[in-house]
Image (cartoon, helix red, strand yellow):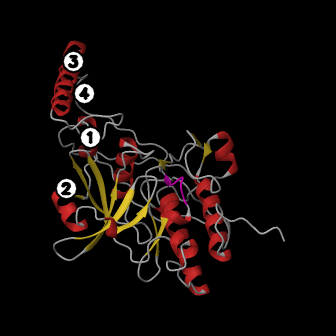
Amino acid sequence: MEKANGAHNGTFLEFEDVYVNGSTLDIHLYWAGKGTTFVPTRGVYGPLISAIAITPNYDVSTGLPAGAIAGIVIGSCTVIMLILALLWKKGYLGGDKLLLTTILVTELRALELQTGYFSLRQIKSATHNFDSANKIGEGGFGPVYKGILTDGSEIAVKQLSARSKQGNREFVTEIGMISALQHPNLVKLYGCCIEGKELLLVYEYLENNSLARALFGHEDQKLNLEWPTRKKICMGIARGLAYLHEESRLKIVHRDIKATNVLLDKDFNAKISDFGLAKLDEEENTHISTRIAGTIGYMAPEYAMRGYLTDKADVYSFGVVALEIVSGKSNTNYRPKEE
């Protein structure tokens, strides 16, 4: 902006003697704030860089010949088929649902996750072999168990159910999305476990369970939420969504904001969870046309009817949750008396 004498003006910056390590050139763009639409006047917002051109001062390789590429593809497919056959022979694969495949493991490794990997033995020890007494919830993904690791730290373990409507793709999506996001109002992912037929996600444990249980649970589960606490929960959800939509390096539409997917810690700080249905929102698109997924009663009309997805869909869902928080009535279960 300084070089162009203002945000509305164009300019051209040239950088020479740029070092390329191997075949990769890293370009880092740092967040420098954003404008406003109201105070004190309508400002400038959106991308200030319109294009980046890179001109190498050396001959660029055209890549491998077609024959070599074909050989690599055929060889890779053969190796994958052999591995799958071996897994099937050992009993790891079976039934209608392919819970663990070489492709799944490859995708997870390709994500270069900043999360840890847990062994099945660690998880079984922490949850007392998935004891029903440690079960703290059940979602679309499967049951969730409380666990205690050997160092004394508490965890929540989400287990992919064999009858779950969500599968390998959602498992990879959830790990990939949430491992790239860090915010006080998003649930923290500690790691995952992929072993045998088990697909497990390990999260921080939140003492007050879900907002749905606090508002609509059985009498022994409901929490007496004062008005300041309800406001604090609303603000926490809003901050989490603002981060997903505007502030994170990935622009994400959650698609399934509802009371069961908002968790509460011991201080009633709200944390958004369950990113299995989340979608990346590429800023040049006015909307994403996608298969409709979510929960009836929380979906925005234009998304539910036409599959037009923008971050406004999450804002609509947040509005429904806010009404639930204020009224104490469930949007999906509420049946008013005739009088």
Report the magenta residues as a range: 252-257
* Rendering coords of residue 297 (x, y %): 65, 56
Please give the name of the residue rendered at 41% of the width and 82% of the height, measured from the top-left corner.
266
In terms of secondary structure, what is the magenta stretch mainly? loop
Measured in 3D between alpha carbons, the distance from the residue under mark 4 to the one under mark 3, in whole angstroms, is 27 Å
Q: Quadrant of residue 63?
A: top left
Cα gap from disc 1 to disc 4, whole angstroms: 40 Å
Image quadrant of residue 102? top left
Residue ID for mark 2: 120
Q: Which structural element holds mark 2?
A: helix
Cα separation, mark 4 vs mark 2, equals: 47 Å
> Which of the labelled discs sits on residue 153, or is there none?
none
Q: Amino acid at mark 3?
A: Ile
Q: Are marks 1 and 2 in contact (CB under 8 Å)?
A: no
Sequence-first tag of 1 and 2 = 1
* Residue picked out by circle 1: 100
Question: What is the three-letter code of the residue carrying label 1?
Answer: Leu
Marks 3, 2: nearer the viewer: 2
Furthest residue to the top? 67
Labels 4 & 3 near each other (Cβ < 8 A): no
Q: Are marks 3 and 1 in contact (CB under 8 Å)?
A: no
Indicate the quadrant containing the C terminus: top left, top right, bottom left or bottom right: bottom right
- The amino acid beneath tag 2 is Leu
Above or below for 108 versus 202: above
Residue, disc 4: 60
In x, y percent, where is residue 50? 49, 45
Foreground tag (1 vs 4): 1
Decide: few, some or many residues near mark 2? Use Cα within 10 Å; few <14, some 14-19, many ≥20.
Answer: some
Distance between the Cα atoms at labels 3 and 2? 34 Å
Q: Residues within 10 Å of mark 1 (few under 14, many from 20)?
A: many
Q: Which residue is mark 3?
A: 74
